[in-house]
Amino acid sequence: MRKKIVAGNWKMNLDKISSKNLVLEILDKTDNNDINIIISPPFIYLEDSVKDCLRRDNVLIAAQNCSSYDNGAYTGEVSAKMLSTIGVDYVIIGHSERRQYFNESNEVLNDKLTQAISNNLKIIFCCGEDLEQRENNEYFDVIKDQLNSTIFLLSKENFRNIVIAYEPIWAIGTGKTASSDQAQEIHFYIRSLIKDKYGDKISNETSILYGGSCKPSNSLEIFSQHDIDGGLIGGASLNSTDFVSIIKSL
Ligand code: PEP
């Protein structure tokens, strides 16, 4: 059985009070069941949120980033070990905003993967094509390259720590969503790549989330697809009513 997951990536939004209120509202409106809810606030709110969320087994915490370095003179960085010691469960690696605005290369992503895995963090690894690559029908190759040069370099054992998020860049924060058929086509493709690389069992056990303008009005249809195991939600995770409605549709 694959894990069903709805993860909320708050990005650089909210303040201390609204963060806490949002977590409490989400906890209040959801049950302890088989769906894993992952909340990914900015670093500075992780610890408070962790403390509140630990009351429930199915509510987990993700950092939005970690350093590619172990420790030392790297001003402004937060290490995977620091995250692990405050009880963080997951870290998001490979998000298109970090690749684009912070120039994160595959080499940097691979160092981050190493740091996360050595510090017992699970990983939500993002991949996805931009609009031009979609329009030129290059998206299968783009995604294959993104995976081959990062998470597919991991051993079978380490790959078990990965949740994949397919996030077409043209759908992130734009209000444009991939249709459920477009998303399923890529999720099926990613699963077949995992099967070729790691075998049937791992491919059936790896959760693959969809991300990109997922909201209450489209989540049910997207999640009804066979290879879509949940969502990575940006904008709609900032409002408990919308986020909970997405969780319930899963
Ligand atoms: C994201 O950035 O991971 C994301 C899916 O954003 P949005 O839901 O706002 O498109």
Image (tube, rainbow, N blue to C red):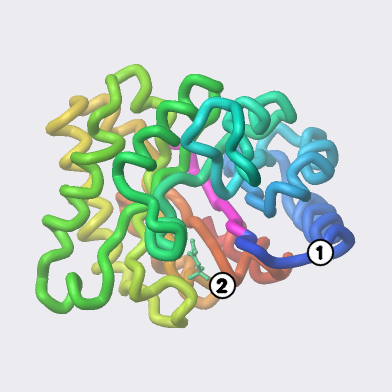
In the image, the residue with mark 2 has its CB under 8 Å from the nearest atom of ligand 1: no
Around disc 2, counting alpha carbons within 10 Å, would you say few (fewer than 14), some (14 to 19), or many (20 or more)? some
Around disc 1, counting alpha carbons within 10 Å, would you say few (fewer than 14), some (14 to 19), or many (20 or more)? few
Give the CA separation, mark 2 to mark 1.
24 Å
The type of residue carrying mark 2 is Pro
What residue is disc 2 on? 216
Q: Is residue 152 visible?
A: yes
Mark 2: secondary structure: helix
Residue at 18% x, 33% y is 195
Judged left or right of residue 90, residue 51 is: right
Q: Which of the two marks, 2 or 1, is nearer to us in this view?
A: 1
Q: Position of residue 97 (x, y in %)?
A: 45, 63
The type of residue carrying mark 1 is Asp
Q: Position of residue 29 (x, y in %)?
A: 78, 57
Q: Is residue 224 visible?
A: no
What residue is disc 1 on? 15
Residue at 60% x, 70% y is 236
Judged left or right of residue 183, residue 18 is: right
Relative to 100, residue 54 above or below: above
Judged left or right of residue 161, residue 67 is: right
Secondary structure mostly seen in the magenta stretch? strand
Relative to 86, residue 99 above or below: below
Task: State the extent of the magenta-drawn residues as a range.
Answer: 2-9
